[in-house]
Amino acid sequence: MPADFLDAALHVAQRAADAAAAVIMARYAAQDFSVTTKEDSSPVTEADREAEQVIKQVLREAFPGHAFLGEEFGREGESRYLWLIDPIDGTKSFVRGYPMFSTQIALMVDGELVLGVSDASAYGERAWAVRGGGAFLRRQQGSCVALKVSAAAEFAPATAVSTGNLKSMAGDPSRWNALAGLIGRVGRIRGYGDFLHYHLLARGAIDLVIESDLNILDIAALVVIVREAGGVFTDLDGGPIGLQTRDALAGPASLHAQALRLFSR
């Protein structure tokens, strides 16, 4: 993948994230939206739909032949270039008025994730990466910093783990028992969830993320960011991340390998 293409695509994706943030933050600040419930019982608002359309408009103007897979409007077009879009990942947080939501934009080329932008405007930071180019984070009014996962190499009292949704794991006795065993070996376990625990992982503030019950749009951009920060990101069986991914395990290589031995079937 030519570096100049990825640099250009990243620039466009950043502009798309800016456009989405303008829509989302205006609605969020005014609490100006109605809420409906989708078939999967998750909420959706006008801000979700408007932001997805704005993102696609920016991307489509730059890349008219590319395809899209969005949270609100599904798949549009067929191409080896597929943009994955979750306009508001964390709509429940958005609706309830606390800032744990983000916009996720990723690019997949020939089935491989190569670019990610994770914008958490209400929280005050944005992370991004392209394959082979490193990962970076900028806080509001702050400078851009390079991201690097921690050097943690084993489970110990200093190890910090974060979990996301674990509903499916709770129904799997072997994995649930593996999680219980892991908890007993680390010093800190929290459920930061959504974008935040991956941002923390990528900058070395925590050491491992474990999740079940997700979809690719939740994590596609974050996969690129964590990998470019030096981490390993797979499903719980060690398989590659793809459109059908439903769970995740991410961390520095050594910890990831040790956790994988616990969780993989």
Image (spheres, rainbow, N blue to C red):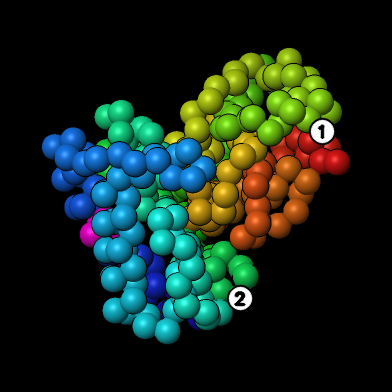
Look at the image and say whether residue 165 sits in the magenta stretch: no
Percent across and percent down for residue 12 are 32, 70
Q: Secondary structure at mark 2?
A: loop
The C terminus - image quarter? top right
Percent across and percent down for residue 94 are 31, 36
Q: Secondary structure at mark 1?
A: helix
The reply, left or right, for residue 8 in relation to residue 191 is: left
> Residue 110 shows which numbered tag?
2
Q: Nearer the viewer, residue 143 or 62?
A: 62
Whether residue 152 is visible to the viewer of this picture, yes or no, is: no
Of callouts 1 and 2, which one flags the residue occurring earlier in the amino acid sequence? 2
Looking at the image, is 22 positioned above or below residue 96? below
Q: Amino acid at mark 2?
A: Asp
> Residue 262 shows which numbered tag?
1
Q: Which residues are magenta?
A: 16-20
* Res 18 quadrant in image: bottom left
Q: Nearer the viewer, residue 236 or 34?
A: 34
Q: Nearer the viewer, residue 52 or 139?
A: 52
Residue at x-position 16% and y-position 45%: 26
The reply, left or right, for residue 259 in relation to residue 83 is: right
